[in-house]
Image (tube, grey):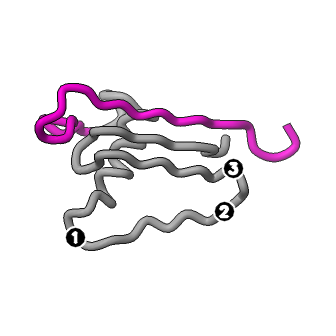
């Protein structure tokens, strides 16, 4: 499988994030401390693994928000 698109809203330190890898691009996640690098990866794991696959944070929503979401689009890689 291949990750085509990944979108997160109001999860941990992330307000809004969208990553599109459909053009075979290399995606680097970088930034200063506290700007959401770990939150981006953690939200992806929460979406793919669910509660059985990892240890969830006590409060996965961004502080002050009542709703958050994460969407992952996958496709089959290779010849089909």
Q: Nearer the viewer, residue 43 or 66?
A: 66
CA distance separating discs 2 and 1:
25 Å
Which of marks 1 and 3 precedes in the sequence?
3
Give the percent coordinates (x, y) of residue 76.
74, 37
Residue that appears at 36% across and 31% down: 69
- CA gap, disc 3 to disc 2? 7 Å
Query: In the rendered structure, which segment of residues is drawn in magenta?
Result: 55-80
Q: Mark 2 packing: few (<14 Cα in 10 Å), some, or many (20+)?
A: few
Looking at the rendering, in which quadrant would you find the N terminus?
A: top right
Indicate left or right for 58 with 21 as reference.
left
Residue drawn 29% across the image and 51% down it: 39
- Where disc 2 sits, the SS reads loop
Camera-side residue of 44 and 6: 6
Say left or right for 11 vs 64: right
Residue at the spot x=46%, y=41% of the render?
7
Numbered label attached to residue 25: 2
**Mark 3, residue position:** 22
Residue, disc 1: 33
Q: Are marks 3 and 1 in contact (CB under 8 Å)?
A: no
Q: Earlier in the sequence, mark 2 or mark 1?
A: 2
- Left/right placement of residue 64 relative to residue 51 reads left
Mark pair 3, 1: CA separation: 28 Å
Q: Is residue 23 above or below residue 63?
A: below
Q: Is residue 57 above or below residue 51?
A: below
Q: Quadrant of residue 38?
A: bottom left
Q: Residue furthest bottom?
A: 32
Q: Secondary structure at mark 1?
A: loop
Q: Is residue 50 magenta?
A: no
Quadrant in the rendering for residue 63: top left
Few, some or many residues within 10 Å of mark 1 (<14, 14–19, 20+)? few
Q: At which x and y percent is residue 66?
A: 18, 26
């Amino acid at each position: 499988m291949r990750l085509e698109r990944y979108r997160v809203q109001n999860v941990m330190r992330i307000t809004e994030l969208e990553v599109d890898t459909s053009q075979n691009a290399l995606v680097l996640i970088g930034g200063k401390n506290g700007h959401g690098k770990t939150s981006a990866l953690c939200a992806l794991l929460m979406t793919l693994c669910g509660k059985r696959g990892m240890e969830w944070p006590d409060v996965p929503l961004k502080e002050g928000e009542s709703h958050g979401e994460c969407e992952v689009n996958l496709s089959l890689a290779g010849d089909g």
